[in-house]
């Protein structure tokens, strides 16, 4: 949630509270009353909004934006972050009082490479979720492909694994996902390319299109789907940049 929308999204607002507020809106905190509110990436929350969040956690009370009547709620707050909050507290980037309120019971989830036993289960789960996007019958993941997935370090963690499985479903030409369907995707680094010179926008586009074509083994239809553009548009880009394709 953008910082400037935090209050209105979490606390809601009254009609006429600001331009465009044509009617009362119930915020996420009020909607979660007698239930749980999950806050993802709480480490990115600014200090001003941290104070507002702390108050409602401590008192169970808040005001809608533009409102004068206090609202009471009874909620459980669950927060997640990929940052070291204790280090942020020391740097003054995260309120210590909010940290202790959120840290009543903590669960540390190790990176995917630290729990390889989960890889196969997650891969099969994401395969089941992605079957609806398959353009041809795909029945599973081959033993060789699964063995390969188990050997990877997954710098992008679960999100990278999910992306790899979903794209393999879209790209495979076999009944089972093969090792070549996941190989280049699983090995792709999340680190940016290092260049000794600034690249023009056209050069960045050319490289991206060529990499996508390489991953799709030159298949224009599949590459166009991954790029989110029409096939005719991709053909025009291929001709413009002199790229290789089927």
Image (spheres, rainbow, N blue to C red):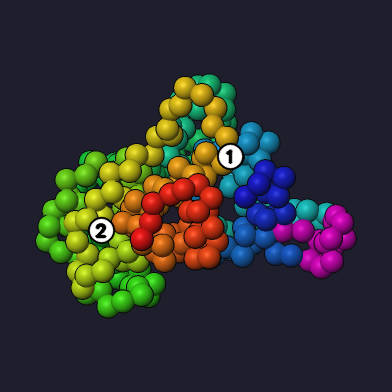
For residue 181, which numbered disc appears in the image? 2
Depth check, front residue: 64 or 180: 180
Location of the C terminus by quadrant is bottom left
Query: Of the residues under marks 2 and 1, which one precedes in the sequence?
Result: 2
Was residue 82 drawn as part of the magenta stretch in this picture?
A: no
Callout in the foreground (2, 1): 1
Q: Residue at point 26% right, 55% down? A: 182
Could you say which is closer to the camera, residue 3 or residue 65? 3
Q: Residue at x 66, y 46 (%)?
A: 2
Q: Which residue is mark 1?
A: 201
Q: Residues within 10 Å of mark 2 (few under 14, many from 20)?
A: many
In the figure, is residue 61 to the left or right of 218? right
Q: Magenta region: which residues?
A: 12-24
Q: Position of residue 245 (x, y in %)?
A: 38, 56
Residue farthest toward the bottom in the current orientation of the protein: 137
How far from the left and from the top, in percent, is residue 57?
Answer: 58, 47
Residue at image position (48%, 53%) is 238
**Residue 151 at x, y percent in the picture:** 16, 45
Magenta stretch: helix, strand or loop mostly: loop
- Evaluate whether residue 59 shows in this view: no
34 relative to 52, above or below: below
Q: Where on the picture, by quarter, is residue 221?
A: bottom left
Res 27 → quadrant: bottom right
Mark 1: give few (<14), some (14-19) or many (20+) Cα within 10 Å: few
How many marks can you see?
A: 2
Q: CA distance from mark 2 to mark 1?
A: 29 Å
Q: Secondary structure at mark 1?
A: helix
Q: Where residue 214 sits: x, y (%)? A: 34, 51
Q: Secondary structure at mark 2?
A: helix
């Amino acid at each position: 949630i953008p910082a400037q929308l935090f209050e209105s999204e979490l606390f809601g607002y009254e009609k006429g509270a600001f331009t465009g507020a044509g009617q009362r809106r119930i915020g996420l905190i009020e909607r979660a009353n007698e239930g749980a509110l999950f806050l993802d990436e709480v480490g990115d929350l600014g200090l001003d909004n941290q104070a507002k969040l702390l108050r409602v956690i401590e008192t169970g009370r808040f005001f809608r934006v533009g409102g004068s009547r206090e609202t009471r709620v009874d909620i459980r707050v669950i927060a997640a972050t990929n940052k070291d909050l204790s280090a942020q507290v020391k740097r003054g980037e995260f309120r210590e009082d909010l940290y202790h309120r959120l840290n009543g019971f903590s669960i540390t989830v190790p990176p995917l490479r630290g729990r390889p036993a989960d890889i196969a289960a997650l891969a099969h789960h994401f395969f089941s979720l992605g079957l609806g996007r398959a353009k041809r019958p795909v029945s599973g993941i081959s033993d060789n492909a699964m063995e390969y997935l188990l050997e990877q370090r997954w710098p992008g963690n679960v999100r990278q694994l999910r992306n790899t499985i979903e794209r393999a479903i879209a790209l495979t030409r076999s009944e089972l996902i093969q090792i070549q369907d996941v190989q280049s995707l699983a090995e792709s680094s999340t680190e940016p390319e290092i260049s000794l010179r600034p690249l023009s926008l056209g050069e960045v586009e050319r490289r991206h299109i060529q990499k996508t074509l390489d991953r799709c083994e030159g298949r224009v239809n599949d590459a166009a789907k991954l790029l989110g553009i029409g096939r005719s548009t991709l053909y025009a880009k291929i001709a413009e940049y002199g790229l290789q394709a089927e």
